[in-house]
Amino acid sequence: MRAPSPWRSPTGGPSGTDPGPTMPRELVLILDFGSQYTQLIARRVREQGVYSEIVPGTTPIAEIARRGPRALILSGSPASGYRTQAPTPDPAIYDLGRPLLGICYGFQVTAQALGGEVARAERAEYGTATFVQDARSALFSGVPKRFRAWMSHGDEVRSLPAGWTRVAHTANCRFAAARHERLPYHLIQF
């Protein structure tokens, strides 16, 4: 039998993601589009001493704003973002001005929502790939220019929206990471 969770939400109820007495109460909201790694992402955020919650990727902006997140993470997904039935975030999230990290599918739906092009990859990537940085990014501060990263995608961003800069590529992925030129928005394909 499992012991009850020691974690409590800010309202006092069990949540599994509570900051506890030493963790700051600033919230990172993770929009989940069905990634097998969403729980791992939340755990890694908490391991950095930051409170996180997971909500469906299609959560309306009113609910997101009510929660008052300090930052947003858009997860990966088994879906293809360019298909008509693909789950998408409320487009108003891009007007919040909060730091945003799009991971894999989160990269693709963000690029597409803001005017970029997403399509089936010419060569799908599954496994490790050499990630090569092309431009500076605060997200990769202190990280080697080249490193191995886990890639798992059959779709790719073919062109970035206006106002975005490519940060990195792999041998098979022209846009492995990107950043907005003015806003604290970062996108990674791995």
Image (cartoon, rainbow, N blue to C red):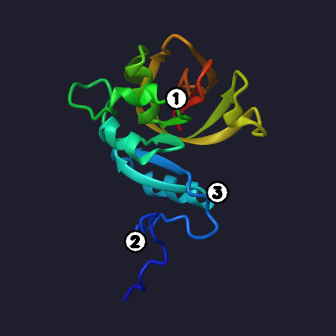
Name the residue: 32% across, 38% down.
Answer: 62
Which amino acid, mark 2? Pro
Task: Determine crowd level at label 3: few under 14, some 14-19, many 20+ residues with C-alpha closer than 10 A.
Answer: few
Q: Which mark is residue 14?
A: 2
73 shown above or below 173? below
Residue matched to label 3? 48
Q: Earlier in the sequence, mark 3 or mark 1?
A: 3
Which amino acid, mark 1? Gly
Q: Is residue 52 left or right of residue 77?
A: right
Residue matched to label 1? 97
Task: Determine crowd level at label 1: few under 14, some 14-19, many 20+ residues with C-alpha closer than 10 A.
Answer: few
Question: Which quadrant of the structure image shows residue 140?
Answer: top right
Task: Determine crowd level at label 2: few under 14, some 14-19, many 20+ residues with C-alpha closer than 10 A.
Answer: some
Name the residue: 53% across, 60% down.
Answer: 43
Percent across and percent down for residue 79 are 30, 37
88 shown above or below 24? above
Q: Earlier in the sequence, mark 2 or mark 1?
A: 2
Which amino acid, mark 3? Gln
Q: Is residue 123 visible?
A: no
Q: Earlier in the sequence, mark 2 or mark 3?
A: 2
Percent across and percent down for residue 4 are 41, 82
Q: How far apart in space, not on screen, are marks 3 and 1 (Cα)?
A: 22 Å
Front residue of 139/134: it is: 139
SS at badge 2: loop
Front residue of 116/128: it is: 116
SS at badge 3: loop
Q: How far apart in space, not on screen, are marks 2 and 1 (Cα)?
A: 30 Å
